[in-house]
Image: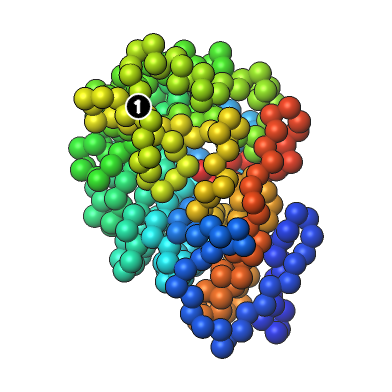
């Protein structure tokens, strides 16, 4: 992590090099965030922890080593950064992990973010294991939507993919979220060939029965894993779509929730089926997102290392939000055109998904 100099300069990581970004207290306050390719950033994902109570095979190594707790941003620092982003025109914040509900007192952060004027959508991505405890508190804090990860509806498969998960806990979390009355509860499933690819129709039926949306995700090559070969396990969105069309008519739509999913409608049903396809249908040209890691690293791209150390800024300038906003604006200059994911080489990104933030 880089640190600011006495002159208010912060070093940002750019593909292994160091780039100088400066702020000036006289800079005018910005109303929006636009990168050098003309894309407007209005969506931030904040990871509150890299820790999780599951160990999903596509998300982390089996011998995962978590970030020491003292290196993490405090919840108050996360709330301050979230406020700065909203001041700059961000309208959607998603809180992620690891598993965000394993972070102690995390509901405090949701309460702080939920009060931000101008924020239209406060979302959580979770594995659902803790939702039966927190669903009502989250809704009262201002959470509008809940995304729940579930990769199999069969207990043994679920345990194999998560390494230690109990399916009934996630199912109980889904029920709790639906009963609580969030604006939207959606399912996410990462599909792996010969692991769960034959369950896509069953997962859609599960979503239809509960009038929920579901998105299928191609595995992203983040971090080195030994559990499976990603190229062999790859199952494209096009193949999933073809499988589902044997059971349902699927009509493409232009609907969006602000993220990368491409949605299809099933005529006569409320359920939408989405596809997040970093390999087969690259979505970088319309990217409107940045990610804040639990350590305070602002990632400008999921699949590149372009980043700025916001932890250094908030600790060097504990009361100067103008400086924080200005460095965020300047960071947009680092946002790359897109990722370079390649299933057939070792990953160029060595951070795992739990470190990146879902």
Image colouring = rainbow
Identify the residue at horizontal 30%, vertical 25% (top origin): 266
Alpha-carbon neighbours of circle 1 within 10 Å: few (<14), some, or many (≥20)? few
The N terminus sits in image quarter: bottom right
Identify the residue at horizontal 50%, vertical 60% (top origin): 40
Task: Check the image and report above or below for 322 versus 350.
Answer: below
Between 79 and 31, the residue placed more toward the observer is 31
Q: How many marks?
A: 1
Task: Check the image and report above or below for 178 versus 102.
Answer: above
Identify the residue at horizontal 78%, vertical 55% (top origin): 16
Coordinates of residue 338 in the picture (x, y in percent): 64, 47
* Residue 270 in sight in this render: yes
Residue 290 picture quarter: bottom right
Coordinates of residue 328 in the picture (x, y in percent): 56, 69
* Secondary structure beneath label 1: strand
Q: Residue furthest bottom?
A: 26
* Residue 295 in sight in this render: no
Task: Check the image and report above or below for 30 versus 2.
Answer: below
Coordinates of residue 191 in the picture (x, y in percent): 51, 24
Q: Which residue is mark 1?
A: 251
Task: Check the image and report above or below for 10 versus 269.
Answer: below
- Whether residue 217 sits left or right of residue 67 in the image: it is left
Coordinates of residue 62 in the picture (x, y in percent): 63, 31
Residue 259 picture quarter: top left
Between 128 and 210, the residue placed more toward the observer is 210
């Amino acid at each position: 992590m880089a640190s600011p100099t006495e002159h208010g300069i912060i070093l940002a990581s750019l593909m292994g090099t160091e780039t100088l970004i400066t702020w000036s207290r006289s800079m005018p306050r910005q109303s929006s965030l636009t990168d050098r390719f003309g894309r407007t950033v209005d969506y931030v994902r904040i990871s509150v922890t890299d820790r999780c109570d599951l160990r999903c095979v596509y998300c982390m190594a089996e011998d995962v080593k978590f970030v020491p707790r003292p290196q993490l941003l405090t919840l108050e620092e996360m709330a301050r950064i979230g406020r700065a982003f909203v001041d700059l025109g961000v309208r959607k914040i998603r809180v992620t992990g690891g598993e965000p509900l394993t972070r102690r007192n995390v509901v405090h952060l949701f309460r702080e973010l939920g009060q931000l004027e101008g924020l239209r959508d406060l979302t959580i991505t979770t594995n659902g294991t803790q939702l039966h405890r927190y669903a009502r508190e989250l809704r009262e804090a201002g959470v509008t939507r809940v995304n729940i990860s579930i990769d199999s509806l069969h207990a043994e498969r679920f345990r194999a993919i998560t390494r230690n998960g109990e399916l009934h806990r996630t199912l109980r979390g889904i029920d709790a979220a639906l009963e609580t009355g969030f604006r939207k509860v959606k399912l996410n499933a990462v599909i792996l060939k010969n692991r769960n690819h034959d369950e896509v129709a069953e997962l859609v039926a599960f979503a239809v029965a509960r009038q929920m949306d579901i998105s299928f995700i191609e595995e992203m090559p983040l971090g080195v894993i030994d559990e499976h070969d990603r190229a062999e396990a790859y199952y494209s969105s096009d193949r999933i779509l073809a499988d589902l069309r044997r059971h349902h008519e699927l009509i493409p739509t232009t609907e969006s929730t602000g993220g990368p999913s491409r949605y299809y409608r099933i005529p006569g049903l409320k359920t939408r089926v989405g596809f997040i396809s970093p390999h087969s249908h690259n979505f970088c040209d319309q990217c409107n997102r940045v990610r804040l890691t639990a350590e305070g690293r602002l990632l400008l791209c999921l699949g590149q290392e372009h980043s700025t150390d916001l932890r250094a800024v908030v600790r060097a300038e504990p009361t100067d939000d103008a400086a924080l906003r200005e460095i965020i604006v300047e960071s947009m200059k680092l946002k790359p055109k897109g990722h370079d994911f390649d299933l057939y080489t070792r990953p160029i990104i060595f951070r795992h998904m739990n470190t990146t933030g879902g």
